Each structure stands twice: as structure tokens, then as C-alpha cells.
Image (spheres, helix red, strand yellow):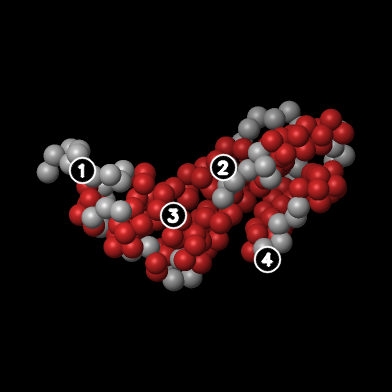
């Protein structure tokens, strides 16, 4: 087999992954089938095998996309060397308002998948732990005690994931109204009005 697909192949690896991600989010992992994706993409099943050894390889690639989008980016925001805890928490808040950074639809598609697959469940548990630990480390950097950092991290993380799970995502107006209070709860400090306003402008710019 050559290193590149034949000229008549219309779908790229990214196309297969994008189609699979949409099906995963919309219908669940049980519906991510090679034949279904081929029909959606308007190509033959055979073209799939230029990019993936089998269906499991496609599913593994979907999990890799989730790890990159919803774990690595989250950790990067939590690890930013911001000068204050308020600014560190606001960096994490970027993930909650910008779906390019953290996609809640993909997150809960993977959570549903984890109910059916023990390996995915273990990956999800690892992801939850990594994200909470990133928040803990963030608070420790800003002088919180170990216990305080642990509690603040869990209150922050579990409240946001819980809102997604319940389907109760606040409107932008509601978020803006309560932003300062959320920051006080999550940090124990009063945010400066300029910090609040700058984040509101950011949130509006990404279409939150």
C-alpha cells in the first residue's frame, strides 16, 4: 500500500474524524459505524482504511481528540503563570465559555460512552482527577492551604460539570450578573471591576 490514498478518495482523515465526532455527540458511540460514516461522507468504506486500521482505531482517535480538547487545554489554562488567583480562575473560566477550548457536548458524549466501556470509564476518571488536580495546584500556587485548595478545586469543578450534566447553562446576561460572585466563591477574594469587565468582553467575543 502506498503512503497516500488514491486520487479519487474524497474524504480526508480529518473528515472521517469530524463525521465520527458529530455522530458520537448526536447519537452515541454505538452509532459510530464505518458504513454510516461512509454514506454521510459520500465515499466507499474502503477509503476508511487508508487512515484507520479498524473501527477501534477510529474510536481511539476520537478519545485522543477529547483528551486534547477537554483535558490538555484545560490544564494549560489552569497552569498559566497569572499574578493573582482571580486572574488564574478567569483563565480557567475561558474554557467554560468558549467551546473551542472545552466542548461540553463532546464531554458528555464521552461520559455516556464511559457507561458502556470500562476502558473509557477509566480514562474519564483519570481526566476528572487531572483537571481537579490542576485546579488544586493553581490555588496552592496562590497561597491556599492544601485543604482549602482541595475544596475550592472540587467546588469549582463539580459545580460546572454538574451544570452541564443538568443542562442548566446560564444565559450570558445571567453569567455576567453573577461573575463577580462566582469569583468570590471560588477564590475568597474580591475581583477588581476591571477584571470582571474584561472577562465579560472576552465572553461576548467568543459567543458564549
Residue 89, position as x, y percentages in the image: 72, 41
Where disc 4 sits, the SS reads helix
Where disc 1 sits, the SS reads loop
Cα distance, mark 2 to mark 4? 21 Å
Cα distance, mark 2 to mark 3? 14 Å
Cα distance, mark 1 to mark 3? 24 Å
Q: Earlier in the sequence, mark 2 or mark 4?
A: 2
Specify the label residue 166 is tagged with. Answer: 4
Residue 161, position as x, y percentages in the image: 65, 58
The image quadrant that residue 36 belongs to is: bottom left
Cα distance, mark 1 to mark 2? 32 Å
- The residue indicated by pointer 1 is 8
- The residue indicated by pointer 2 is 100
Viewer-closest of 142 and 171:
171
- The residue indicated by pointer 3 is 21
Where disc 3 sits, the SS reads helix
Amino acid at each position: 500500500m502506498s503512503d497516500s490514498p488514491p486520487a479519487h478518495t474524497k474524504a480526508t482523515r480529518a473528515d472521517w474524524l469530524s463525521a465520527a465526532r458529530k455522530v458520537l455527540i448526536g447519537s452515541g458511540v454505538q452509532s459510530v459505524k464505518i458504513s454510516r460514516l461512509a454514506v454521510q461522507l459520500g465515499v466507499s468504506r474502503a477509503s476508511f482504511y487508508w487512515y484507520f486500521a479498524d473501527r477501534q482505531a477510529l474510536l481511539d482517535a476520537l478519545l485522543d481528540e477529547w483528551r486534547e480538547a477537554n483535558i490538555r487545554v484545560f490544564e494549560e489554562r489552569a497552569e498559566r503563570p497569572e499574578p493573582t488567583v482571580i486572574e488564574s480562575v478567569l483563565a480557567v473560566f475561558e474554557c467554560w465559555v468558549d467551546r473551542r477550548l472545552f466542548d461540553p457536548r463532546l464531554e458528555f458524549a464521552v461520559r455516556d460512552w464511559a457507561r458502556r466501556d470500562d476502558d473509557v470509564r477509566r480514562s474519564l476518571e483519570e481526566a476528572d482527577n487531572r483537571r481537579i488536580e490542576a485546579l488544586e495546584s493553581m490555588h496552592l500556587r496562590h497561597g491556599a492551604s492544601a485543604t482549602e485548595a482541595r475544596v475550592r478545586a472540587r467546588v469549582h469543578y463539580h459545580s460546572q460539570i454538574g451544570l452541564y450534566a443538568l443542562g442548566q447553562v446560564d444565559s450570558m446576561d445571567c453569567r455576567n450578573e453573577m461573575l463577580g460572585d462566582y469569583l468570590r466563591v471560588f477564590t475568597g477574594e474580591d475581583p477588581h471591576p476591571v477584571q470582571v469587565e474584561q472577562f465579560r468582553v472576552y465572553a461576548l467575543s467568543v459567543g458564549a
